[in-house]
Amino acid sequence: MAIPNPAPTMKDVAKEAGVALGTVSKVINGIPVGESYRLKVEAAIEKLNYRVNSYAKGLKKNKTFIIAVMVPNLINPFFCKLVNCINRSLSQRGYRMLLCATDYDPEQEQAYVIMAEQQKVDGIICLSYNPNLQVTEGLPLISIDRYFGSQIPCVASDNYGGGALAVRKLVENGCKSLAFLRVGSKLTNEPNKRKDGFINACENLDIPYVLKIIDDGVPHSEFWNFLREHLHDGKLDFDGIFCVTDSLAHLTRQALREMGLRVPEDVQIIGFDGIRRFGDMEYTCSTIVQPVEEMAEACVNMVLDKGQSQVPSLVCLPVTYAYGGTTRK
């Protein structure tokens, strides 16, 4: 029986490229070398089909090159896009992702943190619904949308500015009276600021408004009852609605159509998130777009930053408005 050829080593690459072993090591670890040396090493790696032994590399550097990423689920398109962008950013840096879907369960979140620590991950990026999440001191943790305190960096979009932007766009499109619909957690988090931005903008522009806020788990029929209560002679008391998410905007549009109201002719709707059909096609509704790629990049940069003490406690990234058919052009 033929004996298989052993896998090529860094020494084999150095010999094939005609360079020192240290030069090969620098190229593999992304340390700058002369352009001619880099090209020789990369050519030798491709010719020999050399593969970096990430396990051995991790032992040497006391790293696993794994980052745990925790999100509530993989059903919501916003979470899916966020995870995809984080994974791409990690891969570009030679890291792998340990993905955990928590189903909004605080106990599940803590269990995943313990598991991640046991796996010796190099850091955690999480969108948490557990205000008392416990993480071992020294393990980098980056939070998305939830501010835990100055010791745990948080990355978020400009939720307050997004709420105000939605009001301005609705008013620019001719709306005279507005409603705000929200379903979400009772916990304090950055997305709560969407309501504050909405209220502030309405009051500054002297626009009348009403609020309908329900907690997670409450049936959406509460919203539809609210809409029917404000329906008189085939018209709503308001002609513009800001929904706290695109998914709620979609459901609201369906409910209004069942009531015989046209969107956007009778009522205009703006959501929040920037969700696109099939991930990269048209927007599901007119929306305030979160900069997901930039949020993912910020999370990865911060979790891999060796000088954690220099990382800001809150990174707030700008949002934009996008037309998606539920407002007038």
Image (cartoon, helix red, strand yellow):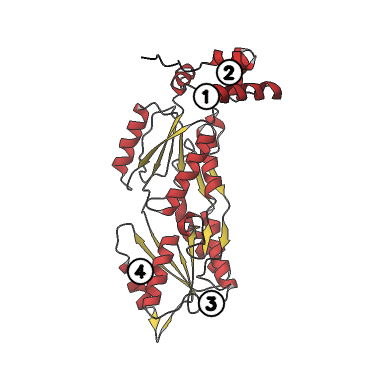
Name the residue carrying label 2. 25
Q: Earlier in the sequence, mark 2 or mark 4?
A: 2
Q: What is the distance, in whole Å, between disc 4 and disc 3 at their CAs? A: 21 Å
For the residue pair 179 and 23, the one nearer the viewer reads as: 23
Q: What is the distance, in whole Å, between disc 3 and disc 2 at their CAs? A: 65 Å
Percent x, y of residue 139: 43, 29
Say whether marks 2 and 4 touch (CB < 8 Å).
Answer: no
Q: Is residue 162 above or below residue 141?
A: below
Q: Is residue 313 left or right of residue 251?
A: right
For the residue pair 36 and 84, the one nearer the viewer reads as: 36
Q: Earlier in the sequence, mark 4 or mark 3?
A: 3
Disc 1 versus disc 3: nearer the observer: 1
**Callout 3: helix, strand or loop?**
loop
Disc 2 versus disc 4: nearer the observer: 2
Residue type at the position of mark 3: Lys
**Callout 2: helix, strand or loop?**
helix
Q: Residues within 10 Å of mark 1 (few under 14, many from 20)?
A: few
**Callout 1: helix, strand or loop?**
loop
